[in-house]
Amino acid sequence: MAMVRTVLWFDGHIEEAAEFYTSLLPDSEITSVMRHPERDDPWPGDGAPGEAIVVDLMLGGVPFQLLNGGGQFPQSEAVSIAVTVDGQAEVDRLWDAIVADGGAESMCGWCRDRWDVSWQVIPRQLGELMQGARGSEVTRAMLGMRKLDVAALEAAAAG
């Protein structure tokens, strides 16, 4: 049987990232860590003995893998972790945790964590509001936001 998972390429600190990510969402855990071996002969790559090469984890029940591959392939918004949450309190909690300690806000509910991984923090109501009769107004409101504001989106939908 095939197993599908998203692999995110990092330049170090994958255990720290994995611990942070799994602390954010229910049904999340680190499932395995592969490390550079403790040995005297050369090992491909730049990792120190005992340093994590690969961390497998579940985020909200979805499998991910973090690969400590080096700096050749930096993170970009071309790949993001999208999390749909219930209500403004959860938007605020996740957003604030993700942008803390060196993360950054972007637009339309997107932000980056301190490892430059992009996230989308989406209130569950957004899809329904965008499909409603005033969907273009909701979209226009969303395009002007950084962290999504559920009350402002609902007000745009109400006119």
Image (spheres, helix red, strand yellow):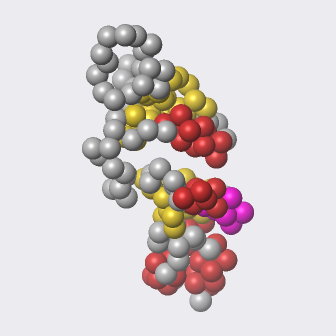
Give the residue drawn at x 29%, y 46%: 73
On the picture, is 131 further left or further right than 43? Answer: right
Q: Name the quadrant containing residue 49.
A: top left
Q: Quadrant of the C terminus?
A: bottom right
Q: Nearer the viewer, residue 115 or 51?
A: 51
Q: Name the quadrant containing residue 65.
A: top left
Q: Quadrant of the N terminus?
A: top left
Q: Nearer the viewer, residue 85 or 75?
A: 75
Prevailing secondary structure class for the magenta stretch in the rendered image: helix
Give the residue drawn at x 40%, y 34%: 68
* Furthest residue toward front: 40
Considering only vertical position in the picture, is 148 above or below 56?
below
| Residue 55 is covered by the magenta coloring | no
Q: Looking at the image, can residue 133 be seen?
A: no
Give the residue drawn at x 51%, y 23%: 33
Q: How many marks?
A: 0
Q: Name the quadrant containing residue 48.
A: top left
Residue 8 x %, y %: 40, 41
On the picture, is 86 further left or further right than 34? Answer: right
Residue 23 x %, y %: 65, 42
Residue 94 x %, y %: 63, 56
On the picture, is 92 further left or further right than 138? Answer: right
Q: Nearer the viewer, residue 43 or 7?
A: 43
Residue 112 x %, y %: 48, 58
Q: Looking at the image, can residue 137 be seen?
A: yes
Considering only vertical position in the picture, is 138 above or below 14?
below
The residue segment tinted magenta is 87-95
* Furthest residue toward bottom: 159
* Furthest residue toward right: 89
